[in-house]
C-alpha cells in the first residue's frame, strides 16, 4: 500500500507523531485502548493496543515477521550488517526461521541457564564490591550494561581479555535494531558487525578443534548435524543470541531497580524477603517493559474490532499497551510485586514462533542482579528519576545512579 493509499484507508484512525507518542505513552494508550483496537503513527506503523489482539496477531499466519525491509529502506542492501539481518532467526520466516532456530533452541537449554546462574550472581556481587567504597555507581553503565555482556561471554567461554571489545561491538550493533540511527552511523555499525562476525568464526573454529562440553561445543555439534545450515547462518544465530540478550536485559535491569527504589516499601519488602524477587522481576517487566512492541507485516485483510488491517501494513504489536490492559490485569497502572494475575506466558517475551529464546536466561540475570543489590546494598537510594524512553521496539532507561552510605 502506498503512503497516500494508507492515509486514505486509515483516515478514521487516530494518528500521532513520534513526539506525541513519546510524551506520555501510557496515558495515550490508556485513553485510546477502549475506543479503538489500533492507532497510527504518522510515519506509517499501526500500534495494536489490546492484549487479546496482540496475542492473537503474534501467531496469525496472515502476518509475518519483518525481514530486511527496514534496513533496505535506509539504503543498506549488502555487506556485514545486511548479512546479519538477512540470516538471523529473529528477522526470518517459515522454513528459514525453523532451520536457524532449531539447533540454537536445542542447545539453549534449561541446564545451561541453571549452570550460569551462580556465575551471574558472583559477577554482580563483584561489580558492587568494585564500587562499594566509593558509595555509589552508575546504575546503567557500571551495573546493568555489564551483566548481560559478561553473561554471554561466560556462556560462550570467551577469554576474559576479549570481553571489553566484545561488549563494545554488542552495544554498537544492537543500536541497529532500534530506530535511533541514521545513515552516518552505518560505517560504525558495519565495522562492528564485521569484527564480531570474524571473531565468532575464529571462536567457533577454535572450539571445533577443542570441544569442552560447553554451550558452544554443543551448538557446533547441533549445526554439524544440520547440513542445510551454512557456516554464515550458524554464526549469525550466535550473534543474534548475543544481541537479543543485551539491550533488552540491561534496560530491564535498570528499570526494575529504579522502580523498586521509587516504591521504597516494595524495595524494603524484597530486602526482607528475597522470595519476592521473581514476582518483583515479572512485575517490573510488566509495568515498564524493555520491549515495547513486536513488528509484523500484514499479508491479507485482517478484521479486528470492527476495522480492517490491510495487506502491506506495518504493525507494532504493543506489548507496552497489552501489559497494562485492564481486561487482563487488575489495576494495571499500579506497580505491585505481589500481584497474582500475571499471565502464564509473560507478554514481554513475545509469542508464537519467535517467542524469546532467552527468557529463562533473562530472568536468571534479572533475579540474580536484583538479589545481589538487595543483599549487598539494601540501604541504596536512587539519584535521578526513572524515565523510560521509547514507545516501540527496545526502550532505554539511562542517567540513573545508585548511592549508599557506608
Ligand atoms: C528482559 C529481557 C528480554 C526481553 C524483554 C526479550 C524479549 C524478546 C521478544 C519480545 C522477542 C520476540 C521478538 C519478535 O517476535 O519480534 C525476543 C526474541 C529473541 N530473544 Fe529475547 N528478550 C530478552 C532477553 C533475551 C536474552 C537474555 C536472550 C539470549 C541471550 C534473548 C534472545 C532472543 C532471541 C535469539 C530471539 C529471537 C527468537 C526468534 O526469532 O525465534 N533474549 N526476545
Image (tube, helix red, strand yellow):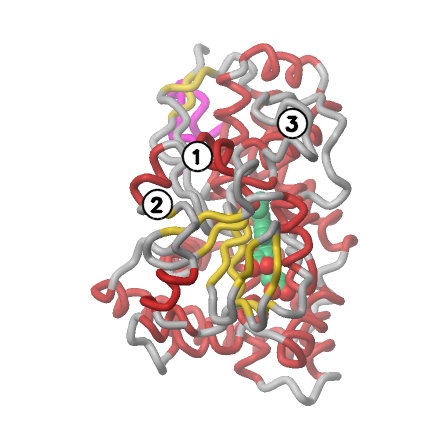
Q: Is residue 368 left or right of residue 316?
A: right
Cα–Cα span, label 3 and label 1: 26 Å
Q: Which residue is mark 1?
A: 28
> Viewer-proximal residue, 90 or 333?
333
From where the camera sits, is residue 156 visible?
no
* Residue 249: image location, x then y, percent: 53, 45
Whether residue 138 appears in magenta in the rendering, the answer is: yes
Q: Residue furthest left?
A: 184
Q: In which quadrant will I find the C terminus?
A: top left
Residue at image mark 3: 280
Q: Which mark is residue 16?
A: 2
Residue 386: image tag: none
Q: Position of residue 50 (x, y in %)?
A: 60, 43
The N terminus sits in image quarter: bottom left
Contact between labelled residues 3 and 2, with CB atoms less than 8 Å apart: no
> Which of marks 3 and 2 precedes in the sequence?
2
Q: Please check the rendered image and state whether residue 16 is part of the magenta-colored stretch, yes or no.
A: no
Q: Counting other residues with Cα less than 10 Å from the Cα at mark 2, is it few (<14), some (14-19), or many (20 or more)? A: some
Residue numbers of the magenta segment: 129-140
Pair 3/1: label in front: 1
Tag 1, which secondary structure? helix
* Residue nearest the viewer, comparing 166 with 174: 174
Q: Earlier in the sequence, mark 2 or mark 1?
A: 2
Seen at 60% across and 41% down, the residue is 322
Ligand 1 quadrant in view: bottom right
Amino acid at each position: 500500500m502506498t503512503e497516500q493509499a494508507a492515509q486514505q484507508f486509515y483516515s478514521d484512525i487516530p494518528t500521532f507523531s513520534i513526539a506525541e507518542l513519546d510524551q506520555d505513552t501510557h496515558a495515550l494508550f490508556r485513553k485510546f485502548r477502549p475506543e479503538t483496537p489500533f492507532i497510527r503513527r504518522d510515519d506509517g506503523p499501526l500500534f495494536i493496543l489490546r492484549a487479546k489482539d496482540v496475542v492473537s496477531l503474534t501467531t496469525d499466519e496472515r502476518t509475518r515477521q519483518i525481514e530486511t525491509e527496514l534496513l533496505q529502506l535506509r539504503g543498506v542492501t549488502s555487506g556485514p550488517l545486511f548479512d546479519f539481518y538477512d540470516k538471523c532467526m529473529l528477522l526470518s520466516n517459515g522454513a528459514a526461521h525453523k532451520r536457524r532456530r532449531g539447533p540454537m533452541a536445542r542447545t539453549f537449554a534449561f541446564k545451561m541457564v541453571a549452570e550460569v546462574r551462580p556465575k551471574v550472581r558472583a559477577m554482580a556481587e563483584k561489580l558492587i564490591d568494585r564500587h562499594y567504597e566509593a558509595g555509589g555507581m552508575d546504575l546503567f553503565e557500571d551495573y546493568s550494561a555489564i551483566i548481560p555482556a559478561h553473561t554471554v561471554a561466560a556462556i560462550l567461554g570467551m577469554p576474559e581479555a576479549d570481553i571489553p571489545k566484545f561488549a563494545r561491538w554488542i552495544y554498537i550493533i544492537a543500536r541497529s535494531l532500534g530506530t535511533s540511527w541514521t545513515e552516518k552511523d552505518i560505517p560504525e555499525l558495519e565495522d562492528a558487525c564485521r569484527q564480531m562476525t570474524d571473531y565468532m568464526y575464529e571462536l567457533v573454529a577454535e572450539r571445533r578443534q577443542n570441544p569442552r562440553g560447553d554451550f558452544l561445543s554443543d551448538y557446533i555439534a547441533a549445526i554439524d548435524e544440520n547440513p542445510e545450515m551454512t557456516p554464515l547462518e550458524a554464526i549469525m544465530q550466535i550473534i543474534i543470541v548475543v544481541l537479543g540478550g543485551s539491550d533488552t536485559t540491561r534496560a530491564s535491569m535498570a528499570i526494575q531497580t529504579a522502580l523498586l527504589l521509587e516504591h521504597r516499601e516494595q524495595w524494603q519488602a524484597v530486602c526482607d524477603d528475597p522470595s519476592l524477587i521473581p514476582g518483583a522481576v515479572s512485575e517490573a517487566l510488566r509495568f515498564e517493559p524493555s520491549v515495547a512492541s513486536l513488528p509484523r507485516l500484514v499479508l491479507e485483510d485482517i478484521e479486528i474490532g470492527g476495522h480492517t488491517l490491510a495487506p502491506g501494513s506495518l504493525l507494532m504489536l504493543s506489548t507496552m499497551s497489552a501489559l497494562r490492559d485492564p481486561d487482563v490485569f487488575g489495576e494495571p497502572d499500579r506497580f505491585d510485586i505481589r500481584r497474582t494475575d500475571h499471565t502464564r506466558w509473560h507478554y514481554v517475551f513475545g509469542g508464537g514462533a519467535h517467542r524469546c529464546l532467552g527468557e529463562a536466561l533473562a530472568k536468571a540475570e534479572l533475579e540474580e542482579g536484583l538479589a545481589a543489590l538487595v543483599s549487598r546494598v539494601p540501604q541504596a537510594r536512587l539519584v535521578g528519576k526513572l524515565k523510560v524512553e521509547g514507545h516501540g521496539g527496545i526502550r532505554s532507561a539511562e542517567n540513573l545512579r545508585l548511592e549508599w552510605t557506608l
